[in-house]
């Protein structure tokens, strides 16, 4: 159980499966692979590597799942963020990769849930909903392209009337239903995978912040209490680390997003708002996302804040949004509310590659981390097994850096936020 003030009002922490007490690192030890960060990237990579017989240690500053992986919307969607941008940079090679891996993350998660009997309330069904004709056109284009690539059978377009049967709200003009998409209790998924990894011999150190990485033939991660010398290191701290600042600092928007969870809804109300239990996100840049939990609550996320300013009254900020989408919930109260940082690279292309010959890193999946982190875990295991020198295609991506981030970063990001809000208002 995550016992931390930041998780006091987190529904996932309140409904998490029990976990063992794990030690802090207080010695100098050696493993094949040392992983920094116990979120999906770290845990999924550890499990992929342990399945291939490597000895692995995870070093987590707080607890497994403490970061974005134990706080997110639980939507397990197909595809990657930044696809268009990377295809514009690399052409056919990136396009082939994105189509090949569109639902690979979902497949990996589903196989693991079955193989390791992970209880995490995994249910199929997702939808992206449009506020205007322009957004609907872009969903139609997505549908057509997916149909051409063999995914037509899992997707369907819904006009305003048809969508009303899936999402009982009058504010949308239509949507794209995705039966291959899914939603789950992400913290229990992450904890379940960590437990499976431990059964395969992975050692997890908690409450241990890595303070630096020594690069070289045998890279070493250092913490106040001990070190791990390894053949390979994976940096999987995403938006919650500040290691390797010279190389990685300034590329990601420290975007915060918030989630509130209602009291349990009367059964007929829960069934009426989302009759086939879809996970929904809208097509705005500054988007709302929501779904039902198995105990009949509405888990409602949004208020993505690219300026990294904290919202103190999360309920107060989220209630009008929820009531705008579902006016029929005007008397329903929230029981849990929390926020978390999503790593969003300026061009939205995930940042994945080598920091040096034997030190890999991955961060910045934007809102697609549940599925994509699992694909990256397999790609890292392949790279380590085959001693690869490139993580294809991401390592060839060009990223943009906010200059003098500490001085002008926040105002620049606030400006970016206004730009995205304006795009939503204009429907572009
Ligand atoms: C509120 C919210 C809603 C979201 N909704 C969705 C969604 O519905 N679907 C989706 O696909 N994605 C969603 N995302 C994004 C998704 O959660 C992330 O992309 C994903 O969880 C990233 O996993 P990760 O393991 O890379 O990072 P994290 O889960 O953030 O894990 C990083 C870990 O590294 C640890 N760490 C950091 N620095 C150090 C250090 N120096 N030493 C040791 N440990 C360290 C941290 O404590 C943390 O536990 C959402 C994110 C948020 C915040």
Image (cartoon, helix red, strand yellow):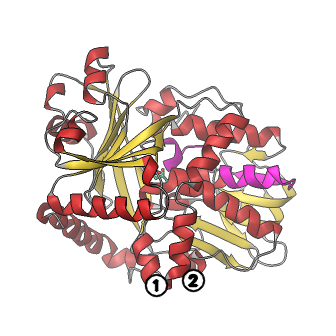
In-image side of 395 versus 324 (left or right): right
The reply to whether the residue tagged 1 has its Cβ within 8 angstroms of ligand 1 is no
- The range drawn in magenta is 43-72
| Residue at image location 61% in from the left, 48% down from the top | 107
Q: Nearer the viewer, residue 13 or 213?
A: 13
Residue 397 seen from this side: no
Q: Is residue 318 above or below residue 304?
A: above
Residue 355 seen from this side: yes
Element class at badge 1: helix
Image x and y of residue 342, in percent:
43, 56
**Residue placed under numbered mark 1 in the picture:** 89
Quadrant in the rendering for residue 126 = top left
Q: Is residue 11 above or below residue 242?
A: above
Element class at badge 2: helix
In-image side of 143 versus 332 (left or right): right
Label 1 neighbourhood size at 10 Å, few (<14), some (14-19), many (20+)?
Answer: some
Q: Nearer the viewer, residue 288 or 66?
A: 288
Image x and y of residue 137, in percent:
23, 62
Q: Count the marks.
A: 2
| Residue at image location 84% in from the left, 44% down from the top | 201
The answer to the question of whether label 2 and label 1 lie on touching residues, with beta carbons closer than 8 A, is yes
| Residue at image location 72% in from the left, 72% down from the top | 359
Q: Quadrant of the N terminus?
A: top right
In-image side of 35 versus 51 (left or right): left
Quadrant in the rendering for residue 212 = bottom right
Image x and y of residue 239, in percent:
49, 60
Q: Mark 2 or 1, which is nearer the eye?
A: 1
Q: Is residue 172 above or below residue 316?
A: below
Image x and y of residue 405, in percent:
38, 77
Q: Tell me if residue 124 is in the magenta stretch.
A: no
Q: Which mark is residue 396?
A: 2
| Residue at image location 65% in from the left, 74% down from the top | 391
């Amino acid at each position: 159980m995550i016992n931390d003030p930041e998780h006091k009002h987190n529904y996932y922490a309140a409904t998490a499966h029990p976990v063992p007490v794990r030690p802090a690192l207080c010695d100098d030890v050696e493993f094949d692979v040392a992983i920094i960060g116990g979120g999906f990237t770290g845990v999924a990579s550890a499990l992929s590597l342990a399945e291939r017989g490597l000895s692995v240690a995870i070093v987590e500053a707080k607890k497994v799942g403490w970061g974005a992986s134990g706080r997110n919307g639980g939507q397990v969607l197909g595809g990657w963020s930044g696809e268009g941008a990377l295809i514009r940079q690399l052409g056919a090679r990136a396009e082939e990769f994105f189509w090949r891996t569109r639902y690979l993350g979902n497949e990996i998660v589903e196989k693991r849930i079955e193989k390791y009997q992970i209880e995490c309330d995994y249910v199929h069904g997702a939808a992206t909903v449009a506020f205007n004709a322009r957004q609907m056109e872009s969903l139609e284009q997505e549908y057509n392209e997916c149909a051409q690539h063999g995914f037509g059978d899992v997707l369907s377009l819904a006009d305003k009337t048809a969508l009303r049967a899936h999402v009982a709200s009058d504010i949308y003009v239509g949507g794209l239903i995705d039966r291959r998409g899914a939603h789950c209790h992400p913290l229990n998924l992450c904890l379940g995978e960590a437990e499976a990894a431990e059964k395969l011999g992975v050692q997890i150190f908690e409450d241990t912040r890595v303070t630096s990485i020594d690069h070289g033939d045998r890279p070493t991660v250092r913490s106040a209490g001990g070190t791990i010398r390894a053949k390979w290191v994976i940096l999987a701290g995403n938006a919650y680390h500040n290691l390797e600042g010279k190389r990685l600092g300034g590329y990601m928007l420290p975007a915060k997003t918030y989630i509130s969870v209602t009291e349990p809804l009367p059964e007929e109300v829960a069934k009426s708002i989302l009759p086939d239990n879809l996970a929904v996100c809208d097509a705005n840049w500054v988007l709302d996302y929501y779904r039902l939990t198995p105990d009949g609550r509405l888990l409602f996320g949004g208020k993505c804040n690219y300026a990294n300013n904290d919202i103190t009254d999360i309920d107060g900020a989220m209630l009008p949004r929820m009531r705008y989408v579902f006016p029929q919930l005007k008397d329903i109260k929230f029981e849990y509310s929390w926020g978390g940082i999503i790593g969003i690279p300026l061009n939205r292309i995930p940042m994945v590659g080598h920091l040096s010959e034997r030190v890999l890193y991955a961060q910045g999946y934007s809102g697609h981390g549940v599925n994509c982190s699992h694909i990256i875990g397999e790609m890292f295991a392949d790279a380590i097994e085959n001693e690869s020198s490139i993580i294809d295609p991401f390592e060839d991506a060009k990223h943009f850096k906010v200059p003098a981030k500490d001085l002008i970063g926040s105002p620049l990001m606030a400006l970016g936020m206004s730009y995205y809000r304006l795009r939503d208002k204009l429907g572009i």
